Image (spheres, rainbow, N blue to C red):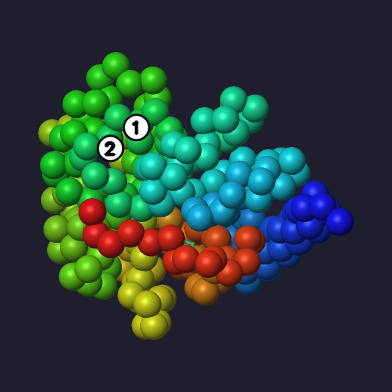
């Protein structure tokens, strides 16, 4: 028996889990009196091979998230040639020296978190192929090891991005502290967004997306519930 069969059954499993997830998102939306179409699943494909991603592309999935520029650069251009309507989100820290690559690859950059990065992006966007949307990452738990602007500096940073760098800011993103209740962090992110007139909230992962939907998430970032457990955690330390 070759690997083909194994890949086929893995594929079926991934597609089944994706559908199951959508049914669960639908129930969470019903409970929260929200429209299912107002919550988008970003399929987090970090650490997953292109073959696993193709299973979802084949059934019409088009929104994916990656957390490392290098990995996305190796995986996505070939897939993109065949599926040009893919929407790729960067959900991991962005180093200023990778800004050009990021602008070539990503439709949404969810991790804008410091003035030096805003400056580098603004500069690189002159003449870039793509004009991505930006979300500001907020370090809602004020964790030392985590990227993101601290909540008390969020308003000022959003203002700087808009005024000084003319970056199109569409919303906010957060990753709550591991092992703590996530709801207060989601609620805080929603408050910061509301008072800054921002409509998009990227919050909620496999462990806590129902709560995120209740609190207004417009994007949930889901890896494990779709692709299964990761062998490595695929995270980077702070950029
Ligand atoms: C890995 C990752 C996710 C997905 O996490 P799961 O628990 O596998 O759903 C979401 N957001 C970010 C920023 C990630 O790095």
Is 19 on the left or on the right of 196, as rendered? right
Question: Secondary structure under badge 1?
Answer: helix
Residue sitting at 25 percent across and 19 percent down?
Answer: 126
- Residue 119 location, quadrant: top left
Q: Residues within 10 Å of mark 2 (few under 14, many from 20)?
A: some
In the rendered image, the vertical position of residue 204 relative to residue 91, given as above or below:
below
Quadrant where the image shows the C terminus: bottom left
Image location of residue 228, percent across then percent down: 62, 66
User: Who's the residue at 65% across and 27% down the image?
Assistant: 82
Mark 1 lies on residue: 101
Q: Identify which residue, 198 or 92, lies in the foreground.
A: 92
Question: Which residue lies at the image location 38% right of the left edge and 68% below the top edge?
Answer: 186
Q: Does mark 1's beta carbon lie closer than 8 Å to ligand 1?
A: no
Outermost residue toward the front?
1
Q: In which quarter of the image is residue 170?
A: top left
Residue 13, position in %: x, y?
Answer: 76, 61
Q: Which of 50 and 140 is in front in this view?
A: 50
Q: Do the residues labelled 1 and 2 touch (CB within 8 Å)?
A: yes
Query: What label does residue 98 carry, if any?
Result: 2
Is the N terminus in the top left, top right, bottom left or bottom right quadrant?
bottom right
Decide: is 82 above or below 24.
above
């Amino acid at each position: 028996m070759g690997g083909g069969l194994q890949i086929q059954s893995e594929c079926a499993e991934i597609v089944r889990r994706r559908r199951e997830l959508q049914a669960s998102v639908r129930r969470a939306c019903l409970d929260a009196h929200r429209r299912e179409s107002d919550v988008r699943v970003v399929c987090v494909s970090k650490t997953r091979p292109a073959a696993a991603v193709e299973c979802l592309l084949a059934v019409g999935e088009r929104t994916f998230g990656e957390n490392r520029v290098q990995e996305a650069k190796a995986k996505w251009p070939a897939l993109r040639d065949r599926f040009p309507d893919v929407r790729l989100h960067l959900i991991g820290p962005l180093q200023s020296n990778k800004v050009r690559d990021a602008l070539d690859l990503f439709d949404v950059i969810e991790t804008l978190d410091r003035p030096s990065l805003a400056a580098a992006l603004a500069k690189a966007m002159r003449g870039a192929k793509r004009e991505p949307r930006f979300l500001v990452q907020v370090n809602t738990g004020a964790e030392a090891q985590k990227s993101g602007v601290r909540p008390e500096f969020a308003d000022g940073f959003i203002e700087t991005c808009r005024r000084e760098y003319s970056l199109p800011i569409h919303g906010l993103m957060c990753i709550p502290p591991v092992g703590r209740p996530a709801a207060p962090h989601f609620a805080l992110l929603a408050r910061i967004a509301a008072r800054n007139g921002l409509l998009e909230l990227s919050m909620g992962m496999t462990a806590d997306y129902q709560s995120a939907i209740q609190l207004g998430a417009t994007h949930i970032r889901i890896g494990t519930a779709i692709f299964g457990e990761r062998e490595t955690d695929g995270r980077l330390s702070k950029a």
